[in-house]
């Protein structure tokens, strides 16, 4: 990874889900480097306490990401405070475990509202500012589950597949405005992701889904033991925003890389096995 000195290259950052996990690490590192940071949380007091800063370059915001007006107001306040918005990091989200049958419509929609529609609202509201500037960088935090999902995490994987897909097309759509896009797929990092504050399990589990229960037990036992260092991940994400040609897709963590490579191999085998059938769909002459 290229190391870049950012202290003399100031940007304005808008980071969602900033009171814990990657978001909190990002905010603290950026503030320490003199960057201007607008950070959002559902709970303003919790955010301010977690960050522990009252500096002029820090703008804490209480935002409901599922509410477009709330997001739009936050963008307006950021622009008013700092004059521009250079980098958006869509970090807010939470995990949800359960089979599709076990998870209710409310549980499922709730996860999509934060993980997907919250991200869409932020992108929609920041685009007028970035188009006017003819510059900007949108960084969406996905998950390795958005490419190589595991048993028991169907809806969470679906939200992260959505982030991967929308980011890929967004990059094409906004290139003409000088705006860059990166979608980050982390593996297991030692954050609060596996705690009750960030992870929901189906309220009505079904005993028939034994493989799902086994998967959940295995993941929950990982809490506090994950190999990934969130401070290193935050530094890598910040670094990407200063690269002239940043990657569209970025894997973080050895486990994420290994899972992605295994999934690629599996997909290639499946596609090639059915190549003859795939190519046989044209009208006969």
Image (cartoon, helix red, strand yellow):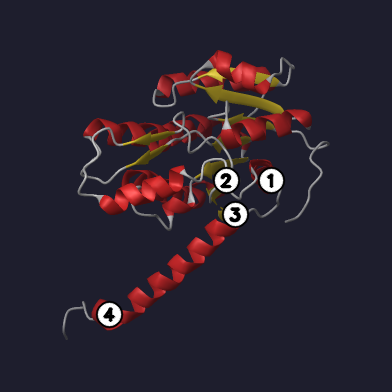
Query: Which mark, by number, is residue 282?
Result: none
Which element type, helix, strand or loop, lies under badge 2?
A: loop
- Residue 46 horizontal/vertical position (percent): 56, 17
Q: Earlier in the sequence, mark 3 or mark 2?
A: 2
Which element type, helix, strand or loop, lies under badge 4?
A: loop
Of the two numbered discs 4 and 3 in the rendering, the one whose residue sits closer to the viewer: 3
Q: Earlier in the sequence, mark 1 or mark 4?
A: 1
Residue 80 in sight:
no
**As displayed, is residue 245 above or below residue 72?**
below
- Residue 140 horizontal/vertical position (percent): 52, 43
Front-most of 48 and 189? Answer: 189
Q: Which residue is mark 2?
A: 225
Q: Residue furthest bottom?
A: 285
Graded by Cα atoms within 10 Å as few (under 14), some (14 to 19) or many (20 or more), the crowding at tag 4 reads few
> Is residue 37 left or right of 161 when viewed as pictured?
right
Query: Which mark, by number, is residue 253?
Result: 3
Q: CA distance from mark 1 to mark 4?
A: 45 Å
Q: Which residue is mark 4?
A: 279
Q: CA distance from mark 3 to mark 2?
A: 14 Å
Among the 4 quarters of the image, the one containing residue 273: bottom left
**As displayed, is residue 274 above or below residue 252?**
below
Q: CA distance from mark 1 to mark 2?
A: 16 Å
Q: CA distance from mark 1 to mark 3?
A: 10 Å
Residue visible at 73% across and 21% down? Answer: 57
Q: Which residue is mark 1?
A: 232
């Amino acid at each position: 990874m290229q190391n870049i000195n950012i202290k003399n290259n100031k940007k304005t950052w808008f980071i969602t889900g900033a009171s814990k996990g990657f978001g909190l690490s990002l905010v603290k590192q950026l503030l320490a480097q003199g960057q201007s940071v607008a950070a959002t949380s559902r709970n303003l007091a919790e955010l301010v306490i977690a960050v522990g800063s009252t500096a002029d370059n820090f703008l804490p915001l209480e935002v409901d990401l599922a509410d477009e007006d709330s997001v739009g107001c936050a963008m307006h306040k950021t622009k008013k405070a700092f004059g521009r918005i250079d980098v958006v990091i869509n970090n807010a989200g939470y995990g949800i475990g359960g089979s599709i049958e076990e998870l209710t419509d409310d549980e499922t929609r709730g996860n999509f509202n934060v993980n997907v529609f919250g991200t869409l609202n932020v992108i929609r509201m920041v685009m007028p500012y970035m188009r006017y500037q003819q510059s900007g960088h949108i960084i969406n935090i996905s998950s390795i589950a958005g490419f190589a999902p595991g048993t028991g995490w169907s809806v969470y994987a679906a939200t992260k597949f959505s982030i991967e897909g929308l980011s890929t097309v967004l990059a094409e759509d906004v290139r003409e405005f000088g705006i860059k896009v990166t979608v980050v797929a982390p593996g297991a990092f030692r954050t609060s992701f596996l705690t009750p504050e960030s992870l929901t399990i189906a309220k009505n589990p079904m005993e028939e889904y034994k493989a799902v229960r086994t998967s959940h037990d295995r993941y929950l036992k990982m809490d506090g033991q994950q190999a990934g260092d969130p401070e290193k991940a935050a530094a890598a994400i910040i670094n990407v925003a200063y690269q002239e040609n940043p990657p569209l897709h970025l894997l973080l963590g050895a486990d994420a890389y290994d899972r992605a490579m295994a999934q690629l191999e599996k997909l290639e085998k499946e596609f090639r096995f059915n190549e003859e059938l795939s190519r046989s769909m044209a009208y006969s002459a």
